[in-house]
Amino acid sequence: MTTSVVVTGLGVVSPNGLGVQDYWAATRSGKSGIGRVTRFDPSQYPAKLAGEIPGFVAEDHLPGRLLPQTDRMTRLALVATDWALADAGVKPEELPEFDMGVVTASSSGGFEFGQGELQKLWSQGSQHVSAYQSFAWFYAVNSGQISIRNGMKGPSGVLVSDEAGGLDAVAQARRQIRKGTNLIVSGAVDASVCPWGWVAQLASGRLSGEEEPTRAYLPFDGDATGYVSGEGGAILIMEAAEAARARGAKIYGEIAGYGSTMDPKPGSEREPGLRKAIELALADAGVQPGDVDVVFADAAAVPELDRIEADAITAVFGPRGVPVTAPKTMTGRLYSGAAPLDLAAAFLAMEEGLIPPTVNITPSADYDLDLVVAQPRTAAVSTALVLARGYGGFNSAVVVRSVD
């Protein structure tokens, strides 16, 4: 019998809310965290808006000895992990260290760390590691810091598949639990609001240059010109359902299905891979399209990519066949942290029976989607589909559902 894997704890760090309660209160009411970049002067760049996390003071949450060893992304991830463990009622020091692991994702977060190393190179010469080496090494630091801080010596890893990585990490965590590990910390937190990271993001050509926050990030809208970047994400505590029930844990829901694909080579005239990823996830979960109560969209806000996603959703569910939402319009796209935050929103939607809105947009009729806009929609939500796509052709889909 296949082990059911559930989520028992959530830790959220988001531009529109720190902690689960603040995040959900803001999201359900349509409160945005997008504004002009404050962490550096953006005036010389074509994109000037971001979803920044306000009010986060690392010294209030972490011991001083950790601060010189970490950057903003890692500090946010460590705090989100602390909150997720507390939410799950888990004290790592009371559990066998080899029965706990960490599987997270990373995408753009190493840029701030690498920029610091570059600055050291310029000021102090060759005694410091190269920026390229530091960036590659940083991908492992986030997961490693979580493992070290909490004494977790079980399976560990970092998935790197851009925005799809957060779902890929959760799927890998589910595999490790099914192999016998009792608890895995998963999800992702990403942060790259720094000059070097900004230049790298601009190179994709997908960032919006609009300077009015309410008009900058408009997925599935005829006025879409690209997305707004952001920082943050969510950490999830994942356990085998039987073990979670045995200790009396609160269960948010089950990671029921997963599918991933790669888009074909440009010019091949083959179909993009997102539809197949959705079908694989539904099949893995053993559910039919009619069982899905809401889709949390990837929401690229790039017309060509919005068309691909809308076509995939309507091909599987039919025209306007399922409610679709993109709460990331309130946070910006958080790279590997985006989809785990959508997973958290899906579980909270199940808990309250409320689909959060996609803010600021006027849906284009060309996409034929039942978009939840402006206001939240009351609905019984027991099964949700979360979609994510990464630069370079990555597609991932996860089905989550409530449990009795």
Image (tube, grey):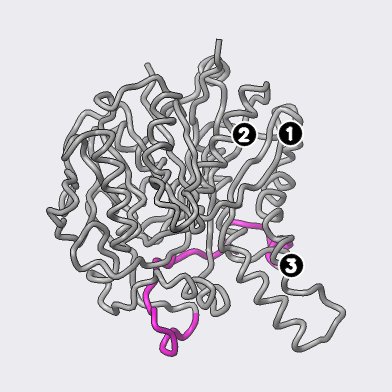
Q: Is residue 367 above or below residue 86?
A: below
Residue 283 position, x and y percent, is: 41, 24
Circle 2 crowding by C-alpha within 10 Å: few under 14, some 14–19, many from 20: many
For marks 1 and 3, give the CA distance: 25 Å
Nearest to N terminus: mark 1 or mark 2: 1
For marks 2 and 3, give the CA distance: 26 Å
Q: Secondary structure at mark 1?
A: loop
Q: Which mark is residue 184?
A: 2
Residue, far right: 127
Q: List the residue tagged with mark 3.
A: 134
- Segment tinted magenta in the rendering: 40-67
Q: Is residue 97 above or below residue 345?
A: above
Q: Is residue 188 above or below residue 155?
A: below
> Of helix, strand and loop, which mostly describes the magenta segment?
loop
For marks 1 and 2, give the CA distance: 8 Å
Q: List the residue tagged with mark 1.
A: 154
Image depth: mark 2 or mark 3 in front: 3
Residue 150 position, x and y percent, is: 69, 42
Instruction: Please say if the residues under marks 1 and 2 sit with CB atoms less than 8 Å apart.
Output: yes
Q: Is residue 35 left or right of residue 4?
A: left
Residue 5 in view, yes or no? yes
Nearest to N terminus: mark 1 or mark 3: 3
Circle 1 crowding by C-alpha within 10 Å: few under 14, some 14–19, many from 20: some
Nearest to N terminus: mark 2 or mark 3: 3
Q: Secondary structure at mark 2?
A: strand
